[in-house]
Amino acid sequence: MTTEKEAVKKPLDFIRQIIADDLASGKHQGIVTRFPPEPNGFLHIGHAKSICLNFGVAREYNGVCHLRFDDTNPDKESTEYVEAIMRDVRWLGFDWEPHLYYASDYFEQLHDCAVRLIEMGKAYVCHLSADAIREYRGTLTEPGRESPYRNRSVEENLDLFARMRAGNIDEGVCVLRAKIDMASANIIMRDPVLYRILKTSHHRTGDKWCIYPMYDFTHCLSDMLEQVTHSLCTLEFENNRALYDWVLDTLQTPNHPRQIEFARLNINYTVTSKRKLLQLVEEGHVSGWDDPRMLTLSGLRRRGCPPAAIRHFCATIGIGKRESWIDMGVLENAVREELNQHAPRVFGVLEPLKIVLTNYPENLVEEVAAQNHPQEPALGDRQVPFCRELYIERSDFMEDAPKKFFRLSIGREVRLRYAYLITCHQVIKDAEGRIVELHCTYDPESKGGSSPDGRKVKGTIHWVSAPHAMRAEVRLYDRLFTVADPEMDKEKSFKEFLNPRSLTVLTDCALEPGLARATLEDRFQFERQGYFCLDSVESSPDKPVFNRIVTLRDSWAKISSTA
């Protein structure tokens, strides 16, 4: 596995090259980046790319990265989201140290900047409705029209803006707009809105303000006030860069951060729109923002994905200028690689079928030595109880098996991993014809799973001692959507492509008894099944619940060859 440290030794991506050149030329003595989330939802895998980039380059070049909340829309923001975002950033492995900021910290300074623009004749109060502003703005092929309020006097605009701040004007009646160019080829520059009236209590400032700055006005000035050197954002803000620069140039600010855009993370079989994620939560399609099927960071954490795997994934996909799609398998492989190195191996039977070894002593219990990690001998062995009655996977038996079925069947011999060779002789069924028990014999001379006379046994299956088994619920997760791009059909809702089999709950699984000591931090490979961990929300000592983090990439044939 390529480590994060090794990943930065590759040729520099275009952002790191810009930063390296700026430092080499003396343009900056040090770099300052920022991660600026809006506290109106939970972070998702797309945000992880931005977090790893902003905090990562700051770490690599001995700079600092700020965590700044863009809290300018009190209708949709809350302290709950603020706390969740901070928790996610820390979980991912980054720390802002003393550099925690909020756009609301700067409301007074932003207001003063707006007043200066009015005094310079570069901003005006407009009474057009939101629909009229859109209509007046024009199209990509037609220039916009000037608002009838565009040429108000500075004195009138200052008075109206003061009345807006004082709460003397109702919501939706008017806004403050920049006065730039209604014929600009860049529609964003056609007198964009800078402030609007929102008579909503703010989660930090309470009712002190009833006017709130727009993102484009807030962002550049917040960067400037924090002396950010490189403002890294995704490509959808490329056209907004002109406004970013216009505000700073017009106000002649003491420093001017450089905005640089990079391609956002598009990953298939999911959606990353906060609005759509919120729909899934509010309409009950998932259990919450931390549902393990969601690619929110809280969902990935609850599912059991190691943060190192997410960082490795972000390093693997790299930074570019061209939009592209990443296959979900790339993320899953990053998780597998990390877990394969560190997760101890255990036995877990998810759909138990009981077998009775009819020639095994009834009261005998042996301790079988099983490797904790076949590739890491230093991790040693564990002792697993073995006795007359065992559980195997129901799928590991077939009554009328084809020739190439190398697991258990009538008259066929298989190897119980680390234990003995067994042969099935009888099938017990209930009144409905369902197989409920198998009667087998074991070869006492084959302890450890080797055949004493050198006979070849192709099949190796896992097992759990029936009287010693730990009973648990296991949740198997699959991709949330059935198609790679749930938003591809504009005539259908993305929700029509939800995968009805994205969650399978198995309520009576049999796990090896040592898993009773598992903690929320532990990750395990259930041999032949995948990687699992305790669910941090639903699991309890009385009812352990395990989540499957990811399936195994390797076939059992490859695993059994190491037995």
Image (cartoon, grey):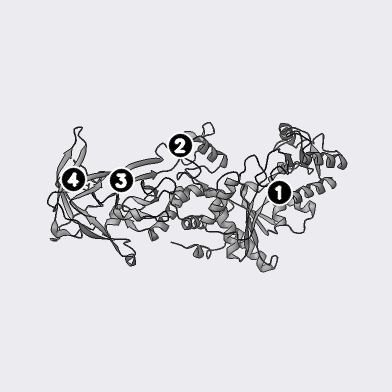
Marks 4,1: beta carbons within 8 A: no
Marks 3,1: beta carbons within 8 A: no
Q: Nearer the viewer, residue 143 or 371?
A: 371
Marks 2,3: beta carbons within 8 A: no
Q: Nearer the viewer, mark 1 or mark 2?
A: 1
Mark 3 neighbour density, 10 Å: few (under 14) some (14–19) many (20 or more): many
Marks 2,4: beta carbons within 8 A: no
Q: Earlier in the sequence, mark 3 or mark 1?
A: 1
Separation of disc 2 and disc 4 at Cα? Answer: 38 Å
- For residue 74, above or below residue 64: above
Separation of disc 4 and disc 1 at Cα? Answer: 69 Å
Residue designated by label 1: 218
Residue 558's spot in the image, x, y percent?
30, 56
Q: Secondary structure at mark 4?
A: loop
Separation of disc 1 and disc 2 at Cα? Answer: 37 Å
Which region of the structure is painted magenta? 477-492
Magenta span includes 517:
no
Separation of disc 2 and disc 3 at Cα? Answer: 27 Å
Q: Nearer the viewer, mark 4 or mark 3?
A: 3
Q: Magenta stretch mostly in which secondary structure?
A: loop
Residue designated by label 2: 498
Q: Nearer the viewer, mark 4 or mark 1?
A: 1
Q: Earlier in the sequence, mark 2 or mark 4?
A: 4
Residue 378's spot in the image, x, y percent?
33, 67
